[in-house]
Amino acid sequence: MNRNFLAKSSAALMGLALLLAAGTLHGEPLNESKPFAEKFLLLQLSDDEAEQQSRVLSVAANLLEHYGPDTIDIEVTTFGPGVRLMYADNSRRERISSLMAQGVRFSVCMNTINTIERDTGNRPELHPESIPVDVGVAHILDEVEKGYVLVRP
């Protein structure tokens, strides 16, 4: 009877340890602001087509609704023409801000922004809550290595 109790206790503790480790890498959460996230998604946007921008925002909103904002960690990474989504005057700004309020992060490739400034002489104004990253594609590679799943809707 003691052995059976120990075996069950050990199994329960192992299960608890596995649950606590879910969504972590080396014992640390992938994103400290989403400690209970079980899904980790990186949405790539490298096109400036209105339909593509809407699709990326819809995917993020649908997944938040499906999983709940606490159990999914979503980042939208923009580079190339896709950075236009994060222009301060983008017509989707309200929708972007709503997603941000639910924990979705939006990163912007500063390499692209610098190129735009060099080519046009003007630096575009970005959404104030966007997250600058040096090189968008390198950022994607780094996040995928951490455990994020890359999707290009």
Image: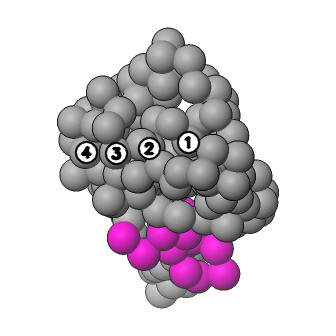
Task: Name which of mark 4 and mark 2 comes first in the sequence.
Answer: 2
Q: Which residue is mark 1?
A: 83
Name the element at disc 2.
helix
Look at 63% across and 44% down and name the residue there. Answer: 120
Q: Is residue 144 above or below residue 152?
A: below
Q: Is residue 77 left or right of residue 139?
A: left
The percent coordinates of residue 117 (x first, y second) are 62, 53
Q: Which residue is mark 2?
A: 86
Question: Which is more foreground, mark 3 or mark 2?
Answer: 3
Range of residues picked out in magenta:
21-33
Task: Name which of mark 4 and mark 1 comes first in the sequence.
Answer: 1
**Residues at discs 4 and 2 in contact (Cβ within 8 Å):** no
Q: Which residue is mark 4?
A: 97
Task: Name which of mark 3 and mark 1 comes first in the sequence.
Answer: 1
Q: CA distance from mark 3 to mark 2?
A: 6 Å
**Residues at discs 4 and 1 in contact (Cβ within 8 Å):** no
Label 1 neighbour load within 10 Å: few <14, some 14-19, many 20+: many
From this viewpoint, is residue 112 visible? no
- Disc number for residue 29: none
Task: Based on the picture, tell me whether residue 65 belongs to the magenta stretch.
Answer: no
